[in-house]
Image (cartoon, helix red, strand yellow):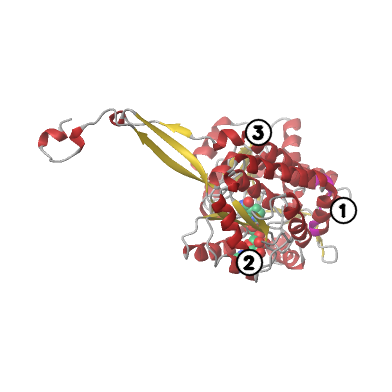
Amino acid sequence: MSSSASVSMGSFHESLGSLQEVRESGRTKDLAWRRSQLRGLLRLLTEKEDDIFGVLHDDLGKHRAESYRDELGLLVKSVNHTLRNLEKWAAPEKAQAPLVSFPATALVVPEPLGVVLIFSCWNLPLGLALEPLSGALAAGNAVVVKPSELAPYTAAFLAANIPRYLDPRAVKVVLGGPEVGEQLMELRWDKVLFTGSARVGRTILTKAAKHLTPVVLELGSKCPCIVDQLYSKRDRQIAVNRMAGAKWSVCAGQACAAIDYILVEEKFAPILIGLLKSTVKRFTTTPECMARILNAKHFQRLSNFLVDDKVAASVVHGGSVNPKTLTIEPTILLNPPLHSDIMTEEIFGPLLPIITVKKIEDSIKFVNSMPKPLAIYAFTKNEKLKHQIIDETSSGSVTFNDAIVQYAVEGLPFGGVGESGFGQYHGKYTFELFSHKKAVFKRSFLIEFMFRYPPWDDTKTEM
Ligand code: NAD
């Protein structure tokens, strides 16, 4: 088997054969092997820190501080969490056995699925590849990673370094675009985790049907942020720091869980807009403070949102775009038409519509009129409203008084519902996602009840 950095599709069938051999040999099941892979990942992340900052900057113009906060630092934290808990997660779990089967033992034994495929996306090109990879290795699988071709520096970095730090016979990186993705989906996998658009997600799901391959889809959506009137100046400023940080400082809004739009009461909107303007100005004093738009195609997609006259007229802050530097100013819009593209499509960029409602409770109806989002955010101290949001809406997650940070909470599952995807990962949930929960039932010969067998007569239903 080749230990070269990446694998061409020509030699891929051969390579996959050896991945199966690795699995069949049982070596990836061994907890010591799993630990060594996780330690290898930690070494990769620490020894190659400067290269990582370099490729994330080259792909997206991310500052080192942003890259550390959102990708490198989070990954180190997450891999350490997995290492600390691996033994516990991999241990068989006792289940209750029915009295009628006494004496008996019921166990749930996690077993590796086999060979799994991970498609990652370009906006967190390191994190979205290595976070699921670490969990798949912890669960004892052989893994193929297909990074996004749209973040080519990070993809090349992964292809060059993963074979150096991890077992090259069990972990492969395949480079390429949609055509390579489609060819990969012709093959038989034990599970596929896909992060990307709903459009490609549909293709993945259709192709997976051929081999009955289980699929996890991590997709996008329009994540709403409900902002209640907060009465203290301090609370308002903290809330706005968190909103502005989540919208503009995470890959310039190109994040699946970014705030897509804000819902606020009419009378509070001018105060909120004033605070957002002053805060985003402070957060973006130099161009390095914000990542750039991925490429010309995405730049055009975002610029097109502003072409509509009524949308352009709703801009209350920012709005300038620079095709040369692929940058778009943090932009706030007040009440753009609800039927315009900016309010019907996922924005995935630094444009922030604010929609006013009469009463804050009306925002629940608004959220429910849209497809189920990956996340709902709400800034409020009103416990009744919090309960209403939890009980009366559906989304991958709900976060109160902050935004996006739920992504970093290892104890919480991360994933969508409805059109924002299905299947959840992070922490223990990644381990479970890439494991089969095998039911094991052990009986003894001590007691035998004959009523379970024929010949049948009515006394056997009177027990
Ligand atoms: P995309 O869907 O075009 O691509 C994602 C991956 O699929 C890439 O690796 C790509 O090479 C591959 N691919 C593309 N076409 C393919 C095909 N026909 N067959 C097989 N593979 C194919 O990515 P995009 O549209 O640029 O991503 C943006 C979307 O991803 C947004 O909607 C965003 O919200 C979502 N996203 C979701 C998460 C999450 O965790 N839920 C994270 C990041 C991004």
**Disc 3 marks which amino acid?**
Arg
Real-space CA distance between mark 1 and mark 3, rounded to the nearest whole angstrom: 39 Å
| Numbered label attached to residue 84 | 3
Real-space CA distance between mark 2 and mark 1, rounded to the nearest whole angstrom: 42 Å
Determine crowd level at label 3: few under 14, some 14-19, many 20+ residues with C-alpha closer than 10 A. few
The quadrant of the image that shows the N terminus is bottom right
* Bounds of the magenta segment: 59-66
- Which residue appears at 60% of the width and 57% of the height? 19
- Which residue appears at 68% of the width and 45% of the height? 37
- Which residue appears at 76% of the width and 54% of the height? 161
Q: Ligand 1 within 8 A of label 1's CB?
A: no
Find numbered disc 3 in the image and state the secondary structure of the residue it sits on: helix
Q: Determine the main secondary structure of the stretch shown in magenta.
A: helix
Ligand 1 falls in which quarter? bottom right
Q: Is residue 168 above or below residue 95?
A: below
Q: Position of residue 250 (x, y in %)?
A: 74, 48
Q: Position of residue 258 (x, y in %)?
A: 68, 49
Q: Position of residue 256 (x, y in %)?
A: 65, 52
Q: Residue furthest right?
A: 286
Pointer 1 and pointer 3: residues touching (CB < 8 Å)? no
The quadrant of the image that shows the C terminus is top left
Q: Is residue 393 magenta?
A: no
The disc, 1 or 3, on the residue closer to the chain's N-terminal end is 3
- Residue marked by disc 1: 287
| Numbered label attached to residue 12 | 2
Q: Residue furthest front?
A: 25
Q: Is residue 342 visible?
A: no
